């Protein structure tokens, strides 16, 4: 149980840390990308303004007097394009020239077809009368920026993985240290429960013995006294069953390995059906077994008997007269499944997850019967888990419930 809690705490811690680191990495990448893009835009704008300053209109045509060397533009993966006022190309220099039509609405564009290229478009005004004489478009390949971002992504990814590894190691140590006092307290509580339950048995046996003697020889006892002694005897029996259940739970929680004997599960269920058949007939309940022959598994016969005894008792109690309790057992691959299905009062959906808790008590329709300790289903679940199996419940109010036990057939 505590191993599962430790793993859950560790997983939750790492999940939260990974989420924080991922958000941080995304934030860094977004800011860094925006910064690089803005720097490139500013650089292209300066380049375009310099080229536009050396452009004049002569005889209705753009006269380009550029000092830019084509080789420099090529080396920097840049290009320049001049357009007249009609948007027609008049001259171009460099590499990565765009094939996209001129866009006057977007000053900054990014071409994603083939090679990624960023473009800045600027108007060209006559230096004498500031009249619009054309446009210049400056472009540069984003290959260098993309390469830089890949390195950034790789660095952030490796950093996150390393951080999670070191955090995981630290988390294992911290969760172990944090859970240690809780485990010790829980073990002490279990030991106290076992010791207290064991010590209660002797005085309870003395009370029951003296009550039995008093009730066997009622001479001189008033009728009201006899009723009181009967009530005391009933309470003593209930306390005895409670202490036995607590002692069993404490022992099954504490024991990590149980008896590994070959057990005929079919025979156990047949004996239980025969044992509770008369009780079912008194309540006018149809106790119907459907058992596959010779289902064998490795386990503790007495504990398995207690497991299915608790389930059958539970179903018989909560099934009204005229109802049905059906017990089925089958092979399912390397597992065997046993289902105890009843047509009883059922359980509300929000309460299904609570039925295996110790001393759980629902509404009056499912309150403990006389002598019940409220530990039967908790004991059943503990025994199933100790055998490497599980127990699940499906239920519907007014329709009935079905407890399904899944156990490994050969070993655990």
Image (cartoon, rainbow, N blue to C red):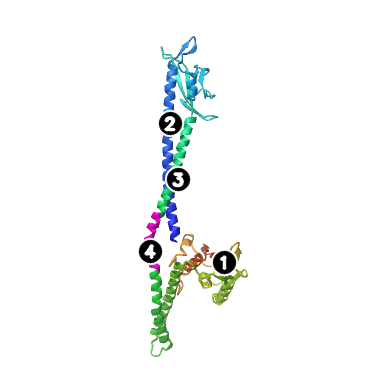
Between disc 3 and disc 1, the foreground one is 3
Q: Cα distance, mark 1 to mark 4?
A: 36 Å
Q: Which mark is residue 92?
A: none
Queried whether the magenta region covers residue 192, the answer comes back as no
Dot 1 corresponds to which residue?
338
* Element carrying mark 4: helix
Number of residues whose C-alpha sits closer than 10 Å to that of mark 4, classed few (under 14), some (14–19) or many (20 or more): few
The N terminus - image quarter? bottom left
Q: CA distance from mark 1 to mark 2?
A: 66 Å
Left or right: 365 as drawn, with respect to 285: left
Look at the picture and state if 199 lies above or below 341: below
Residue behind mark 4: 184
* Residue 170, x across and y down, in percent: 40, 51
Q: Does label 1 or label 2 sit earlier along the sequence? A: 2
Q: Position of residue 301 (x, y in %)?
A: 53, 72
Q: Quote the CA–CA distance across marks 3 and 1.
A: 45 Å
Q: Which range of residues does the magenta coloring cover? A: 173-190
């Amino acid at each position: 149980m505590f191993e599962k809690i430790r793993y859950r705490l560790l997983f939750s811690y790492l999940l939260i840390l990974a989420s924080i680191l991922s958000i941080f990495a995304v934030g860094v990448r977004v800011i860094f990308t925006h910064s690089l893009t803005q720097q490139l835009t500013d650089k292209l704008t300066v380049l375009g303004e310099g080229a536009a300053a050396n452009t004049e209109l002569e005889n209705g045509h753009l006269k380009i007097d550029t000092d830019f060397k084509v080789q420099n533009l090529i080396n920097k993966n840049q290009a320049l394009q001049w357009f007249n006022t009609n948007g027609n190309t008049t001259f171009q220099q460099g590499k990565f020239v765009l094939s996209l039509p001129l866009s006057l609405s977007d000053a900054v564009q990014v071409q994603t077809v083939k090679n990624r290229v960023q473009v800045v478009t600027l108007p060209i005004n006559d230096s004498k009368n500031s009249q619009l004489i054309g446009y210049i478009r400056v472009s540069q390949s984003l290959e260098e920026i993309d390469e830089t971002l890949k390195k950034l992504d790789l660095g952030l990814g490796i950093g996150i993985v390393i951080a999670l590894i070191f955090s995981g190691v630290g988390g294992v140590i911290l969760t172990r240290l944090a859970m240690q006092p809780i485990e010790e307290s829980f073990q002490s509580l279990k030991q106290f429960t076992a010791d207290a339950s064991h010590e209660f048995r002797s005085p309870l046996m003395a009370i029951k013995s003296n009550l039995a003697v008093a009730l066997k020889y009622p001479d001189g006892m008033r009728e009201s006294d006899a009723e009181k002694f009967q009530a005391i005897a009933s309470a003593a029996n209930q306390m005895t069953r409670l202490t036995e259940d607590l002692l069993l739970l404490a022992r099954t929680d504490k024991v990590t390995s149980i008896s590994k004997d070959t057990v005929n599960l079919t025979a156990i269920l047949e004996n239980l059906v025969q044992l509770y058949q008369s009780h079912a007939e008194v309540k006018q309940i149809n106790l119907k077994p459907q058992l596959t022959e010779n289902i064998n598994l490795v386990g503790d016969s007495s504990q398995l008997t207690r497991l299915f005894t608790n389930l059958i008792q539970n179903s018989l109690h909560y099934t009204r007269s005229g109802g049905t309790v059906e017990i089925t057992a089958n092979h399912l691959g390397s597992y065997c499944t046993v289902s105890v299905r009843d047509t009883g009062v059922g359980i509300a959906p929000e309460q299904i997850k609570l039925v295996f808790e110790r001393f759980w008590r629902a509404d009056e329709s499912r309150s403990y019967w006389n002598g019940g300790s409220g530990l039967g289903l908790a004991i059943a679940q503990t025994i199933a888990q100790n055998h490497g199996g599980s127990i699940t419940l499906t239920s519907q109010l007014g329709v009935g419930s079905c407890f399904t036990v899944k156990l490994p057939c050969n070993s655990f």
